[in-house]
Image (cartoon, rainbow, N blue to C red):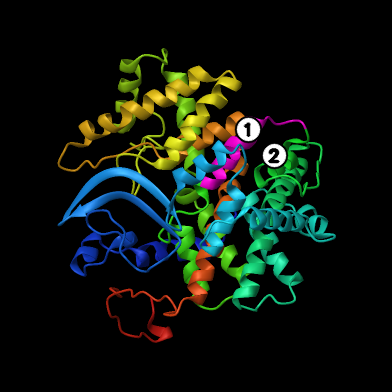
Amino acid sequence: MNKSGIPSIVNHLSASSVSASKIEPQLFEQYSVKRGLRNADHTGVLVGLTNIADVVGYQKEGDVLVPIDGKLIYRGIDVESLVKGAIDQRRHGFDEVIYLLLSGKLPNQTELSEFMEYMGSLRELPDDFTNSMILANKGQNIMNMLTRSVLGLYTLDKNAEDTSPENLVNQSLNLIAKFPTIIAYSYHSMRHFYQHKTLSIRHPNPALSTAENFLLMMKGEGKYTQLEADILDLALILHADHGGGNNSTFTIRVTSSTGTDTYSAVASAIASLKGPLHGGANHEVLCMMDNIKENVQHWDSKQEVTDYLLKMLNKKAYDGSGKIYGIGHAVYTISDPRAILLKKQARELAKEKDRLEEFELYEMIENLAPQIFYDFKGDKVAKRVCANVDFYSGFVYNCIGIKEPVYTPLFAMSRIAGWCSHRLEELTFGARRIIRPAYKNVFPQQPYVQLKDRV
C-alpha cells in the first residue's frame, strides 16, 4: 500500500497497462486509420445517413474545403427561421422543436396545444421517486444523478423493453418532460447535502413552457425575468440537436443499434456528454474569461487583449494549454449560427444585469481571436475559426443565475430531444444494422510462458 492508499498490485498493473496501451502515432498513418473518425482535412468520416439534422460549415470544391457561413438545420428547416418564428410571435419555441425533431414536421396550433398539455402532464416525477432516487442516494455530480434517475425510471416502466415505434415515442416524451425536474431536484439535493443550503423542492407547473418550468423549479416563482426565460428557451432550441456525428448522439446510435432499451441507451449518451471534451466547454470559457478579466487592465484596449491572447496561444498565460476556449469548431468555419443567435439576446441580458462592459469584452475577443489564431498558426496550417456557441452560453447561464454544476445537465436537458429522435431513426429505418467498426490489432506476437518460468 502506498501513501495514497492504493494497493501495490494496482500500481504495478497501472504501470504495465500504460506500457501495453501505447500505440506509436506512425502506425495510424501506416494502416490508414482515421483517429477520432476524422479525415486528414479535419472533416468527419461519413458513417451513416440521417433525416434529422444537418450541420454546415464548409462546402467541398474538388478536394478543397471552402469556408462558408454556418447553418444548423432541423428536419430541413434552418434553425434561424425556427428561432425567428418563435420570437416574432412572442412565444417559446423549444416544445415545437421537440415535436419537429421527433415527427419530421411542425405542429399546427391544435397539435402544439395538445402536445404542450401532454408534456405538462408528464413533468411530475413518480410517487416517492424524488426521495428514493434523488434525495436518499446523494450525489456530487448532477450528470451521474441524472444517469441514475434515468435507469431508475426503467424499473417503473412495465414496457421498458418494448421497442415498437409507439412505445419508443412514449418513452421519449416521458424522459424529455422529466429531465428538467430531475436536474432541478438533483441540484437542490446536492446543495443541501454538500453545501448545507435549504432544500427546495418545487413542483413543475403544467401551464408553463420547459424554460419557464426549469427556472421556476431552480429559482422559485417570481424570481426570474421574462428575458431570462426567453433566452433560456433560445439556448434549448440551439442545443436540441447537432447531427448524428457529435459524440453523445453517435453514442446513443451505437447503443441503440444493439436493440437495447431506451433507458440504457439514454444513459450511455449522458455518460458521453459528461466528458469535459464534449459537454464542459462553456465552463472552460468562463474560467478563461475570469483569468482574462484579472490580467487585462483595460478591457476596451484591443492591444492589451491581443497581447494576452497571444500569450495564451504561446502557452505562457492562463492554463498553458495554448487554447482560446470557445473559439473554433469541428465543422463551423466562418460562423456558428448558434453563437450568432445567442449573442443577440446575450447583449440584452447583459444590459438587464448591468454587465454590458463584460459582454463587450467577450465581443472583442470574438472579433480579434480568429485573425490572431490565423496569424499565429501560419497560413499553411491554420484553418478558419469562429466563436462557437459555448463562447456565450456560459456567460448567459451565469447572468441568469444558473450555477456551473448545472451547465452540462442543461445541455442534456435540451439534447435529449435530439438523442431520442436519433434513437427512433436508428431502430426504425429499413437498413438497420448493428454498428461495428473495425480495429487493427498491432500488439506483437509473444509465446506462452509456463507459470513457473515467468519472471
The one nearer the camera, 130 or 237, is 237
- From the top left corner, tell me how far across and down residue 388 is, in percent: 40, 40
The one nearer the camera, 116 or 184, is 116
User: Which amino acid type is marked by label 2?
Assistant: Leu
The residue lying at 51 percent from left, 48 percent from top is: 239
Q: CA distance from mark 2 to mark 1?
A: 9 Å
Which secondary structure class fits the magenta region best? helix
- From the top left corner, tell me how far across and down residue 62 is, in percent: 15, 57
Tally the numbered discs.
2
- From the top left corner, tell me how far across and down residue 322 is, in percent: 33, 36
12 over 342 or under it: above or below: below
Tell me whether circle 2 and circle 1 mark residues in contact (CB < 8 Å): yes
Location of residue 20 by image quarter: bottom left
Q: Is residue 318 visible?
A: yes
263 over 162 or under it: above or below: above
Horizontally, is 26 left or right of 416 in the view? left
Q: Which mark is residue 215?
A: 2
Q: Which residue is mark 1?
A: 228
The residue lying at 58 percent from left, 58 percent from top is: 99
The residue lying at 52 percent from left, 72 percent from top is: 256
Horizontally, is 433 left or right of 144 in the view? left
Residue at disc 2, secondary structure? helix
User: Which amino acid type is marked by label 1?
Assistant: Glu
Task: Give the magenta part as a residue range.
Answer: 222-237
The residue lying at 25 percent from left, 62 percent from top is: 24
Location of residue 319 by image quarter: top left
Closer to the N terminus: mark 2 or mark 1?
2
Residue at disc 1, secondary structure? helix
Q: Is residue 416 visible?
A: no
The one nearer the camera, 224 or 150, is 224
- From the top left corner, tell me how far across and down residue 154 is, in percent: 70, 70
In the image, residue 403 lies in the stretch drawn in magenta: no
